[in-house]
Image (spheres, rainbow, N blue to C red):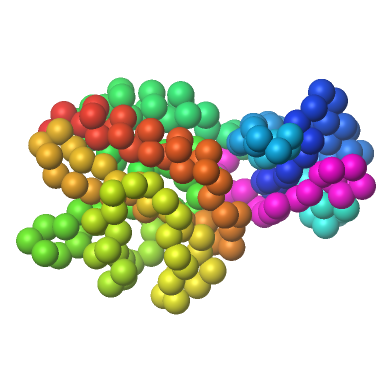
Amino acid sequence: MAFLLRVELPDVPGSLGALATALGSAGADIEAIEIVEHRSDGFAVDDVLFELPSNVMPDALVTACHRLEGVRVHWISRYNAGANLSMDLEAVEAFTDEPAHAIGRLIEVIPATFRTDWAMALRRDHGEVIVLHETSTAPEIVPEAAAWVGLRKTRKLAEIDAWDSVVLAASPGKDRSGRDFVVVIGRHGGPEFLNSELARLAHMVSLAASVQTV
C-alpha cells in the first residue's frame, strides 16, 4: 500500500539519511524522496513516497519521525497516483509534446506532479464560468469560481463549504489568443500549499499557456 509523507527536517548533512533509516526501521519501503522546499530558517520540507505492509500502521511512521531531533510530520496519507513522483521536467515534457493541447495536458499531469486530488482549468465565456479541462475526480464548479477567473496572481484560496476540507490554490493564465483562464487545484484534507509549490504552479501554467498553439 503506497503512502505519501510530507515532513519538515533540519536542512543539514545527514538529516535525510537519518530520516530514511528511521522510516525503514519502522517498516517503510521507500520508493522516492523529493525536496519540496528549502527554507530560510534552516529547515527543509520533503515528500517521501513509500510502500507499507498491511500489518504496519501509518502512525508508526509518524512516531519514528518524531523521535528524530527537529523533525516534524506535516501530513501522511494514502497515495493513489501511482508509485512514482512526477518531476516538473517530466510534466513539462508531457504538455510540450502536444502544443495544441498543452493546457489540457497540464491539467492531466498536475495531480501526480503536485500531489493533488484533482485539477481544473476555468474560463469566463459571455459572463458564465465554464470548465475548459478537468481531471476525472474534479468536483462540480461552484459560484465562488466566478471570482477565481479574475485572479491576477497565484495564491491559496479560502476553503469553501461545498468542498468540505479541501485545501485549494489557483493560478491565472492567458493563452496566446489573449483569453484569460485559471487553473484550480485541490487536496482533500491537506497539506497546505507551500510558497514554493505556488511558484512552481505559476511557472508551469505560464509555460503551458505560451506553448498552447490554438
**Residue name at image x 26 percent, y 42 percent:** 173
Residue located farthest toward the bottom when viewing the structure as drawn: 161
Q: Is residue 39 left or right of residue 200?
A: right
Region of the chain picked out in magenta, as a range: 64-82
Reply above or below: 10 against 77: above
Q: Is residue 66 magenta?
A: yes
Image location (x, y in percent) of residue 123: 20, 54
Reply above or below: 203 against 170: above
User: Does residue 121 appear anywhere in the picture?
Assistant: no
Image location (x, y in percent) of residue 5: 70, 46
Q: Using the rendered view, name the quadrant where residue 110 is placed.
A: top left
Quadrant assignment for the C terminus:
top left
Q: Using the rendered view, name the quadrant where residue 92 is placed.
A: top left
Image location (x, y in percent) of residue 14: 85, 25
Q: Is residue 207 left or right of residue 45?
A: left
**Residue name at image x 23 percent, y 48 percent:** 181
